[in-house]
Amino acid sequence: MMDNTARLDHVVLWVRDPVASADFFEKAVGMEPVRLSEFSAGAAPFPSVRLNEETILDLMPLTMAERMKMLPGATESSGHPVNHVCLALPGDHFDALRARLEERAAPVSDISQDSFGARGKAKRSFYFRDPDGNVFEARHYD
């Protein structure tokens, strides 16, 4: 039986090189690539990476921005990054993520305490950028 409560299904990120982005999210962030081989073979328009069993990030090639015509004005807003996407992780995964990002010399912010979010105040949080300049926040509540 499927649980049909409201959840975040996916976020679309505009990227210059979807394969390189998938590699970053797999190796630095620890996400599993989805449809990467299909994308590489030309059978899928974009790959994704899996955050958890119910949420993915779509790695949309920036070259597709001009084709986004699903709503009036969609083309004009396509290709613009969101302010940031926040990933809530267990404390040990938070520490492991930061270590992997630092190993790859990815830009990271200082660690903050008690940032407000969907579950209240997070113990610690920090921001980082992916290779396309998209900003992410990582946090943990435990």
Image: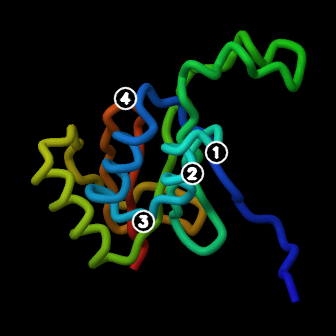
Where is residue 74 shown, x and y percent of the image?
Answer: 78, 19
Q: Are marks 1 and 2 in contact (CB under 8 Å)?
A: yes
**Residue that numbered label 1 is attached to:** 43
Q: Residues within 10 Å of mark 1 (few under 14, many from 20)?
A: few
Quick one: SS at disc 3? strand
Where is residue 76 shown, x and y percent of the image?
Answer: 71, 10
Q: Residues within 10 Å of mark 2 (few under 14, many from 20)?
A: few
**Residue that numbered label 2 is attached to:** 38
Name which residue type carries label 2. Answer: Glu
Earlier residue among tags 2 and 4:
2
Residue 96 numbered mark, or none: none
**Residue that numbered label 3 is attached to:** 122
Label 1 – label 4 distance at C-alpha: 27 Å
- Pick the residue in front: 55 or 82: 55
Earlier residue among tags 2 and 3:
2
Q: Are marks 2 and 4 in contact (CB under 8 Å)?
A: no
Name which residue type carries label 4. Answer: Gly
Label 2 – label 3 distance at C-alpha: 38 Å
Name which residue type carries label 3. Answer: Ala
- Pick the residue in front: 32 or 29: 32
**In the rendered image of this protein, does residue 74 appear above or below residue 102?**
above
Earlier residue among tags 3 and 4:
3
